[in-house]
Image (cartoon, rainbow, N blue to C red):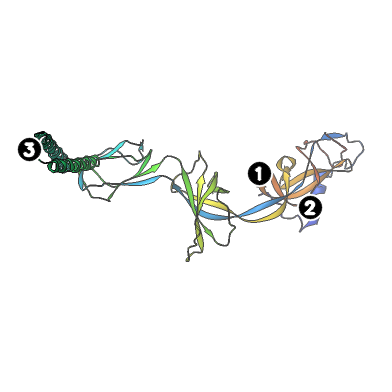
Amino acid sequence: MRTIAAIGTLPGILFLAACEKHGNEQVGSPDLPPLEVQIVEVEQREYLRTQGLPGTVHPVDQAVIASKLMATIEEVDVVIGQQVTEGDVLIRLIANEISAQVEQAEAALAQLQRNLVREQALLAQSATTAETVRTLEDQIRVARARLEEARIMETYKTIRAPFSGHITAKEVRRGDLATPGMPLLTIEGLGNLEVHVNVPDSLQTLALGAEVSLESGNIGETGQLVEWSTAANPASRTRLAKLKVSEPTALRSGQYVKVLWPAIAEPILWLNAAAIREVGQLDQVFTVEEGRLQLQLIRTGPRLGGGYQILAGLRPGDKVVLNPDPRTRDGQPAILKP
């Protein structure tokens, strides 16, 4: 922020600075040639002040990979940081008993199918009952279901990536025993980040879809409010909000960010940055009054968009020269560009 501490408190110092700056100029001299200028007006705008809240970046897609079987790790095909595609093989398990169950189910089904063929032939000769045939048909349906179950269990021996992403944690090695529910790997999706922030109840309520500014070092981003808890934490009096980060982004999972949450709106004076000339520690502008240029010393606040907040030196509606020429002099006649 560029400021002049003396303005408003030590007017004598400003007067001396202005005299030193312009002591050799012919202020208001009729010999100065007219200058064609383009002007902008000092605007009164509504500025939304913000409060910085600590937030953390999280991936939208994140999964902890675990086994559904108790089996030995035969092979781990990935390393931490590796990028994988949905469906890629991550881990292979040794579970020979599952393969044996598949063979047993296949054999049982084949035997029942042979028995059914025989009983149907006997029924045609009235040598057996229809109930016997129906019983065998029911047993075959049960056997097929058992075979399907065994085949599904066999697919659990190969663990694949549920979505495309990066491996961020690896908990096992080849030869380890995997048990159902034990974490083996952690995978985070590509992109699709969100910031989690605890918002005090005292701050402004925003509607879902509202845009909120984010800062992390030199990184400036925008987040869209996609989730906000209706219940406050009784210990901290805060509510969890989730902000979806715009893509592409330089933010990373786990990174700290400052969330600039809107706090209160107040009127301010705003001026285009191209109208302000910096001379040493002073900020100057040229206003147009009664057809002549008047040098004004101003005090600026934070930069807002393409301009600055004006703290002192100007009033709403003042006409200020845009992109002032370095040769512009105080008191010089002005011709306004259309």
Task: Decide if residue 174 is in sight here.
Answer: no
Residue visible at 69% across and 55% down in the picture: 266
- Residue in the foreground of this view, choosing between 121 and 154: 121
For the residue carrying disc 2, how many other residues have a C-alpha within 10 Å: few (<14), some (14-19), or many (20+)?
some
Left or right of 153: which side holds 290? right
Amino acid marked by disc 1: Gly
Query: Which mark lies nearer to you, 3 or 2?
Result: 3
Residue under label 3? 127
Label 2 with label 1: CB-CB less than 8 Å: no
- The reply to whether callout 1 and callout 3 are in contact (CB within 8 Å) is no
Label 2 amino acid? Leu
The residue closer to the viewer here, 155 or 259, is 155
Badge 1 is on which residue?
305
Can you identify the residue that label 2 sits on? 14
Q: Residues within 10 Å of mark 3 (few under 14, many from 20)?
A: few
How far across and down, in percent of the image, does residue 21 sit? 80, 45
Q: In the rendered structure, which disc, 2 or 1, sits on the residue that comes first in sequence?
A: 2
Q: Amino acid at mark 3?
A: Ala
Q: Is residue 329 visible?
A: yes
Q: How far is mark 1 from mark 3, CA to CA?
A: 94 Å
Residue 311 higher or lower than 305, as above or below: below
Residue at image point 81% right, 35% down? 37
State the image coordinates of residue 59 (x, y, percent, origin top left): 43, 46
Residue at x 87% of width, y 39% of height: 332
Which mark's residue is nearer the viewer, 2 or 1? 1
**In what quadrant of the picture does the C terminus appear?**
top right
Q: Residue furthest right?
A: 30
> In 3D space, how far apart are the residues under numbered discs 3 and 2 (Cα atoms)?
121 Å
